[in-house]
Amino acid sequence: MQWLADGQRIKAIEAISVGSMARRLPALVVRAFRLGWRIDRASVALLLTSQVVSAVLGAAGLFATTGAIAALFGPGPIGDKLTHAAPSILVIAAAAGARALLGITIRTVTVHLSPRISREAEAAVLRATVAAELTAYDHAGYNDELEAADRGAEVCVDIVGEAQNLIAALASLVGAAGVLTVLHPLLLPLLVLAALPQGIASVHAARVQFLANRAAIGDRRIMANLRWYIHLKRNADQVRSDTMGEFLLAKYEQVGRRLDVSSRQAALKGARVSVIGAAASGLGTALVWGTMLWLVSTGRMSLPHGGAAVFALGSVGTSLHGIVGYGADLFRTGMYLDDWSSFLDTAGGHRPQRGTAVPPAPRRISVHGLTYAYPASERTALDRVSLHVDRGEILALVGENGSGKTTLAKLLAGLYLPAAGSVRWDGQDTRDLDPHALWRQVAVVPQDYARWPLTCRENITLGQPTPDGDEAVLRAAEASGAGEVVAKLRRGLSTLLAVEWMGGEELSGGQWQRLAIARAFHREAGLLVLDEPTAALDPRAEHRIFRNLRAVARERAVVLVTHRLTNVAVADRIVVLEDGKVLQEGTFAELVADTGGRFRELWDLQNERTGVPAQRAVPARETEEPLP
Ligand SMILES: Nc1ncnc2c1ncn2[C@@H]1O[C@H](COP(=O)(O)OP(=O)(O)OP(=O)(O)O)[C@@H](O)[C@H]1O
């Protein structure tokens, strides 16, 4: 699935050599600190300063250790030796104390900074997601990339810690290496050589683990979705009444087992590489110690220098170990971070490339030769459609399932852009309009409307109150039938509509739909799109909506999508779609009178079960009523 779009990137990751990985580490460290810099310069500056001072103190301590050992192992009476060693011992103690304090500072700042970096990274993903074109979701791989970016943002919490650990290890390596080189120039290159195989193995293991995680992303998303579907309150009754629990759990476990297999394979592969690296490094370390013994035993190095070298070797070994380990950690985190930044690029690629014209409420929306195909689909959802809708007019779109009604409504609302042909608002192509300004002129009641876990008021205003405040909210609520819902709520408009949250209340499906319509009525928009707006409403509530619709349409162009053909009598014109093409167009009376037409066929089918003859079933045209 994902790999179609992302295959090249995966190949690029597989092709990364250990050398190029090592070269990437500085860039990753810089990236980590740059992320932190954007959030909290003072903390990053404090971190870096503490790190440098700590490294200098580390080197001073090591030099003092050498001095102390030389003084203690040197010739002369013990009293003189202690007197000579005392200043060095004082330096060792002071450096150790100061480094301990700096260590605490570094840990505290890191703990404080890391979660904020992660949050900032998450916010960047959210911003990019919201800014992208709606059609981005229909592109193969987009959702997986989004998921990978989320994981990248999550692991950002580690990156500063890892980067600063790497810097700390590097800094203490520099100090200890200096001391070691002074003691004997042969020791340092040998030690580096000994650490190298383990370094290579660690980076290989990190790469194996990352690739396995990356390959499992689709399965992890399936599991997350299954968890979500099983948990969701909205599905809880169906999980029980349809006795689906075991079936869904079995699916969850099946995917889990698949993940286990791939992660076991990756772990074994990583372990094999690590064992080879550790064995090679073990041999290298033995060589280093052998060399040192040889140097001391052949008099090429004095005994006090040998003692000091033992300390320096220990310190350099720890630093090299740290560099290898933290470097591998940082590299792995960096790869996740690459996913994060690559998603920001991808989402950036889906950022609207439209014009900047700001449209007023449209007088006419016209469609010419409109063709549209979803990115992942080979079929055209709309094929050379032409129509128009004027302000003050209700245009109904009817047709069988999958005929293209919702897609057309989304194109009229500028949510998608045509592949061919055009959608024009007062003659201006939607491609040339500023999308946000365009959407401010659009109110949509989609088939699957959102049930925002917000207050009733916010559910209607959508966080965009008009100057009339609650008066406008209540007016919209009355027109949609949501007024009765509000009146029954414990805290009226201020009631939180999320029963899972403290003090919240829950609404029925139809009550939620009334709110969804109220929010569209409340919005001061020039185009109103109603996609099956009354599917969950009782007959009285539905009647009220259609009775009020004409008054609502006075200042707007209204597009109504519905399968309930009785309701389309309210429309001025009806367009019948089939397989994305316009099959018929006319008034309700014209289409019902056309006995050979598709509309009449659907109309007859709908009335067949009521036993009412088709012509007699024709509803009276709604007369305009003022809004309450
Ligand atoms: N996100 C999508 N990706 C790919 N194809 C899609 C997508 N959404 C819809 N389609 C396809 O586009 C065609 C038109 O779908 P659309 O939702 O516009 O139909 P509709 O007339 O509104 O159907 P319904 O009456 O069932 O709501 C269908 O063939 C559908 O399978």
Image (tube, helix red, strand yellow):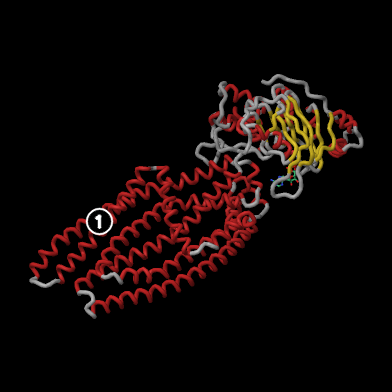
User: Residue visible at 66% across and 33% down?
Assistant: 432
User: Residue visible at 60% across and 29% down?
Assistant: 486
Which residue is disc 1 drawn over? 57
Seen from the viewer's position, the closer of residues 397 and 449 is: 397
Assign the C terminus to one quadrant of the image: top right
Residue type of the residue flagged with mark 1: Leu
Corner quadrant of residue 131: top right
Residue 395 appears left or right of 133 = right
Question: Picture coordinates of residue 261 (x, y %)?
Answer: 57, 67
Residue 120 appears left or right of 244 = left
Question: Picture coordinates of residue 151 (x, y %)?
Answer: 51, 52
Residue 231 appears left or right of 176 = right
Seen from the viewer's position, the closer of residues 296 and 33 is: 296
Quadrant of the rendered image holding ligand 1 = top right
Corner quadrant of residue 382: top right
Question: Picture coordinates of residue 161 (x, y %)?
Answer: 39, 54
Quick one: SS at disc 1?
helix
Q: Spot the residue most to the top.
A: 626
Q: Is residue 227 above or below residue 181?
A: above
User: Residue visible at 28% across and 54% down?
Assistant: 54
